[in-house]
Amino acid sequence: MVEKNIDSLEITPIDEIFIAGLTGGITGYLTSPLDLLKTKLMTDTKKKRYEGLLDCLSKTIRDHGVGALFQGGIAQVLWLVPLTATYLPTYEATKRMLTGCRLETIKF
């Protein structure tokens, strides 16, 4: 069995891109219920079906089931993965460039 010392684990630029995309996708999917409820509340201007966030949540689950909260979750993932896979590593590379720190010197 090969043991790795976690203190000397190095992160490559490819690792950064992968991790950023993965976290963006997870975040997008897990926050899609709140985005759905926010959209329902914002578009409910004339009929006034909902009295607030909790009312919107309970009526959505009652009328369409819990799965309805994740409608649009895949769309969230599809736009957040490429966004975070490019934005976060670019941000980190720029920060390292400005501070003079190289990726190879970062150890966890």
Image (cartoon, helix red, strand yellow):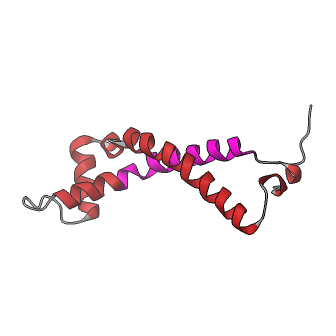
Q: How many marks?
A: 0
Foreground pick, 33 / 94:
94
- Residue range highlighted in magenta: 12-34
Judge left or right: residue 101 versus residue 35.
right
Q: Residue furthest bottom?
A: 99
Q: Position of residue 101 (x, y in %)?
A: 78, 62
Foreground pick, 92 / 54:
92
Foreground pick, 52 / 23:
23
Q: Residue at x 24, y 49 (%)?
A: 60
Please, what is the dominant secondary structure of the magenta stretch?
helix
As drawn, 4 above or below 105:
above
Residue 18 part of the magenta-drawn span:
yes
Q: Quadrant of the C terminus?
A: bottom right
Q: Residue at x 53, y 50 (%)?
A: 84
Dividing the picture into quarters, in which one does residue 106 lie? bottom right
Dividing the picture into quarters, in which one does residue 54 lie? bottom left
Q: Position of residue 92 (x, y in %)?
A: 65, 58
Judge left or right: residue 28 versus residue 42.
right
As drawn, 53 above or below 79:
below
As drawn, 106 above or below 85:
below
Residue 32 part of the magenta-drawn span:
yes
Q: Quadrant of the N terminus?
A: top right
Q: Residue furthest top?
A: 1
Judge left or right: residue 9 versus residue 65.
right
Q: Position of residue 39 (x, y in %)?
A: 26, 55
Q: Position of residue 30 (x, y in %)?
A: 46, 49
